[in-house]
């Protein structure tokens, strides 16, 4: 709970700048789908707890609510709406009501830049959570840096994201660590001597993971016998898979998002490839099995969180998420990571005692705490120092395999 004197002082100083703000359930992007709008409407419930709060603190949330990775964005949105409810029920941010303003970047970098700038110019947000994908984070980061708006991505793993500037933070691990973790799994646990890679050459996330996996796998004594690429949006991968099949690799690394790798996996099995499939955190979605079926069973991928983790933070998050959305399904990593990014940002604003961008930035740099996905503090590049987990797909579901410390 927050001290009454601090709350009164801050509300008096800030109320003028936060009046007239729109409700977070109203998306600032015309591209938001009916399904996404329906999900967003859940945030209205937070008003009941926050009615007595004075003023409003608006934080932008840039998510792919439509498009090929919409399941990611909708999951992240639900988690942030849960956080909004919890913060407002506990007195808001220093006596101010927290409102997340959601916009849909459609998973497209150009759209991310457009809707992100609108959050800054029109909605007057004090900070931004997201964007969710690396390519969109790289597109919006220069704008956030230019306007000195603290931006915290919970899922943009490409190492170039935070190099844009000192107002850009991330609460997830980066691709070099992720590539190293998967390469070590291939060499040590799976005893793989040869590997093939198939990745999107136009996607910074996919390409970055491939490069880092190859570097680490070969450093461990393995050999990449085939490296093939495709373009974003491709649906037919048979030409590349035919070449890969001829090399008979022990493992096939597929560093892309669930909607693409599930299709590749089915085509790979049809092409006669028997290799064990490996991937990154972009695999984490229930839709992986809906699209890929049996083809994605027996695979391994790196991730940030597992619902099988018995830590108090994970157990409580799952309990609260299931209760709010009346579901028996545990939240996925995209929910946990965006919840964490939002929580780190909210706690930093609370600690700063101000919505001044420099004060928030300073509090973020000094952050040291435990959230759902583990303990977080930032290094000199404003990247989170944290552990990774390995997930194995088995029987149409994700199962915890092991945890890897940095």
Image: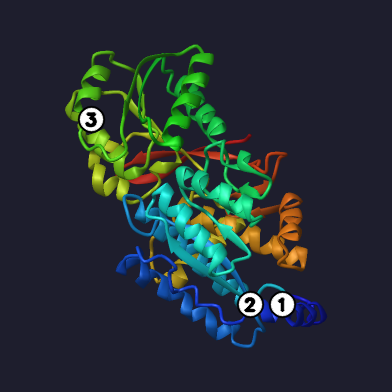
Report helix, strand or loop for mark 2: helix
Q: Residues within 10 Å of mark 3 (few under 14, many from 20)?
A: some
Residue sitting nearer the eye, 234 or 296: 234
Classify 230 as above or below 38: above
* Residue at (73% x, 64% y) in the render: 356
Q: Is residue 301 visible?
A: no
Classify 209 as above or below 135: above
Compute the Cα span from label 3 to label 1: 55 Å
Badge 1 is on which residue? 14
Q: Position of residue 128 (x, y in %)?
A: 57, 59
Residue sitting nearer the eye, 385 or 402: 385
The answer to whether 320 appears left or right of 292 in the picture is right
Scheme by which the image is coloured: rainbow
Residue sitting nearer the eye, 307 or 182: 182
Identify the mark nearer the N-term, 3 or 2: 2
Q: Position of residue 316 (x, y in %)?
A: 56, 63
Classify 93 as above or below 297: below
* Foreground tag (3 vs 2): 2
Q: Is residue 234 visible?
A: yes
Compute the Cα span from label 3 to label 2: 51 Å
Badge 2 is on which residue? 18
Task: List the single residue furthest toward the left.
Answer: 270
Badge 3 is on which residue? 237
Residue sitting nearer the eye, 72 or 192: 72
């Amino acid at each position: 709970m927050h001290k009454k004197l601090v709350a009164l002082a801050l509300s008096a100083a800030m109320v003028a700048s936060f009046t007239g703000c729109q409700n977070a359930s109203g998306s600032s992007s015309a591209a938001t789908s009916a399904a996404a709008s329906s999900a967003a409407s859940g945030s209205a419930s937070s008003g009941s707890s926050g009615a007595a709060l004075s003023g409003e603190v608006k934080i932008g949330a840039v998510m792919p609510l439509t498009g090929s990775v919409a399941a990611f964005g909708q999951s992240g949105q639900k988690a942030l709406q849960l956080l909004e409810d919890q913060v407002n029920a506990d007195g808001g941010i220093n006596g101010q009501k927290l409102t997340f303003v959601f916009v849909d970047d459609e998973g497209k970098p150009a759209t991310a830049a457009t809707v992100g700038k609108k959050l800054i110019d029109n909605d007057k947000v004090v900070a931004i959570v997201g964007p969710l994908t690396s390519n969109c984070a790289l597109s919006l980061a220069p704008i956030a840096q230019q306007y000195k708006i603290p931006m915290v991505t919970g899922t943009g793993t490409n190492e170039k994201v935070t190099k844009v500037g000192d107002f850009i933070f991330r609460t997830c691990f980066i691709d070099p660590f992720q590539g190293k973790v998967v390469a070590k799994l291939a060499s040590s646990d799976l005893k793989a001597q040869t590997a093939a890679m198939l990745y999107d050459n136009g996607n910074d996330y996919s390409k970055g993971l491939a490069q880092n996996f190859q570097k680490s796998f070969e450093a461990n004594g393995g050999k990449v016998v085939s490296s093939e690429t495709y373009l974003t949006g491709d649906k037919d991968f048979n030409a590349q898979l035919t070449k890969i099949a001829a090399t008979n690799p022990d493992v096939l690394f597929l560093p892309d998002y669930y909607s693409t790798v599930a299709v590749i996996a089915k085509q790979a099995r049809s092409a006669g490839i028997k290799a064990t499939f490996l991937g990154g955190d972009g695999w984490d979605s229930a839709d992986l099995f809906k699209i890929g079926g049996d083809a994605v069973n027996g695979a391994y991928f790196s991730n940030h969180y597992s619902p099988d983790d018995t830590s108090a933070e994970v157990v409580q998050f799952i309990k609260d998420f299931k209760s709010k959305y009346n579901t028996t399904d545990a939240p996925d990593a995209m929910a946990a990571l965006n919840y964490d990014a939002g929580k780190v940002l909210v706690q930093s604003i609370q600690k700063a005692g101000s919505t001044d961008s420099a004060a928030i930035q300073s509090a973020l740099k000094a952050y040291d705490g435990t959230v759902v996905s583990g303990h977080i503090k930032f290094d000199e590049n404003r990247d989170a120092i944290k552990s990774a987990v390995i997930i194995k797909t088995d029987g149409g579901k994700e199962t915890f395999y092991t945890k890897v410390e940095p």
